[in-house]
Amino acid sequence: MLHSSELVRSWLQRLYWHTSWFGGVALALSQLWAGSEAAQLLAVAYLVVTSMAFLLAQPYPQWAPVAHLGLALGLLVWALQQPGALVPGWNQEMVLYAGATLATLGLTVLGMFGGLWVMLGGLVLLVALVPHPASGPYWAVWPLWALGGLVGVAVFRAIGRLEAAQQELSRVALQDRQTGLSTRLALEADYQRYQALASRSDQPLLFSYWLLSASSPDDQLLQELAQLTREALRQGDGLYRIDEHHFCGLHIGLVSGHELTERLSQRFASARVVWVACNGLSLEEALRQTQELLYRSPRRPVQILSATPKA
């Protein structure tokens, strides 16, 4: 499932490519039909650059827009340096101001996809290479370029902060704070993956459900308990804390839970363990069956933390 930051980034990328194709290509085609020779050459170059960059968008979704925009700004600089009018009826000054407007938008998008240093590089190149009219307040566009670029950088950093916050939330949601074991939410995410692995390798998948305590242990004791549990099980087994008293595991390649019970019993003499072969079962069905097995036994749950070996 995509996080909201990934959705925002993907939406911005789609918006960029849609604008580049439907807006930029339409403008380029109109110049091919009725533009000057320089405008026609610029249109052909833009179509080639856009096609090549779009092919890179699939393997390099983050950097393809940056590369395309950098090349497009280069074409804009070249166009503004041409002595003749690119647009019929426009004088050179009108072309320069229109180009400055496009450059402001370009720097905003460049900062949005590439960050601060990429935007600063584009800003320096535009200031150095774009010609300006002999008279008039053309210098005022430079602060506007910088402001537009900083707006893009602000969006870039906001998405980065959102990603960092989501990673932290995912870590908290998927890992139990007291034990370091995975949570019920992680179990829901991992269950289908374990099912697919077991199916591809044609191996049994065992779902274990165990009661290790009926008390309310402190954090230190729970951490010791979790460490001993990891050592008692096999490497690669999925271990999860369902609630305060119940734990479960996913085990590929185990035909029976007797081996698992024996390994846990070496650490916890009174551990209660049940299991089902869950190949093809939904998680809800596996939980329902194991809970029925656990509480069907006439033996009442026992407190086993007192039997936990001391480190």
Image (tube, rainbow, N blue to C red):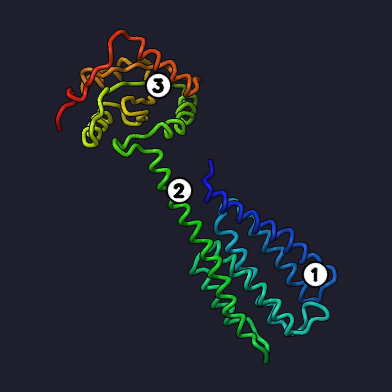
Residue position marked by numbered label 3 in the rendering:
207
Q: Secondary structure at mark 2?
A: helix
Q: Nearer the viewer, mark 3 or mark 2?
A: 2
As measured in the structure, the alpha-carbon distance from the residue carrying label 3 to the one carrying label 2 is: 30 Å
Distance from label 1 to label 2 (Cα)? 46 Å
Q: Which mark is residue 166?
A: 2
Q: Earlier in the sequence, mark 3 or mark 2?
A: 2
Local packing at callout 1 (Cα closer than 10 Å; few below 14, some 14-19, many 20+) is many
Question: Considering only vertical position in the picture, is 25 above or below 39?
Answer: above
Tell me if 143 is positioned left or right of 76 in this view: left
Which of discs 3 and 1 lies nearer the camera? The answer is 3
Reply above or below: 171 against 250. below
Badge 3: residue crowd in 10 Å (few <14, some 14–19, many ≥20): many
**Element type where label 1 sits in the image:** helix
The image position of residue 183, as x and y in percent, is 38, 33
Amino acid carrying mark 1 in the image: Gln
Residue at position x 42%, y 31% from top? 187
Residue 156, relative to residue 198: is it above or below?
below
Q: Quadrant of residue 302?
A: top left
Q: CA distance from mark 3 to mark 1?
A: 66 Å
Mark 3 secondary-structure assignment: strand
- Relative image position of residue 70 (x, y in whole percent): 60, 68
Which residue carries the number 1 mark?
31
Asked if residue 221 is positioned above or below residue 294 in the image, the reply reads: below
Residue 269 x/y as whole percent:
20, 18
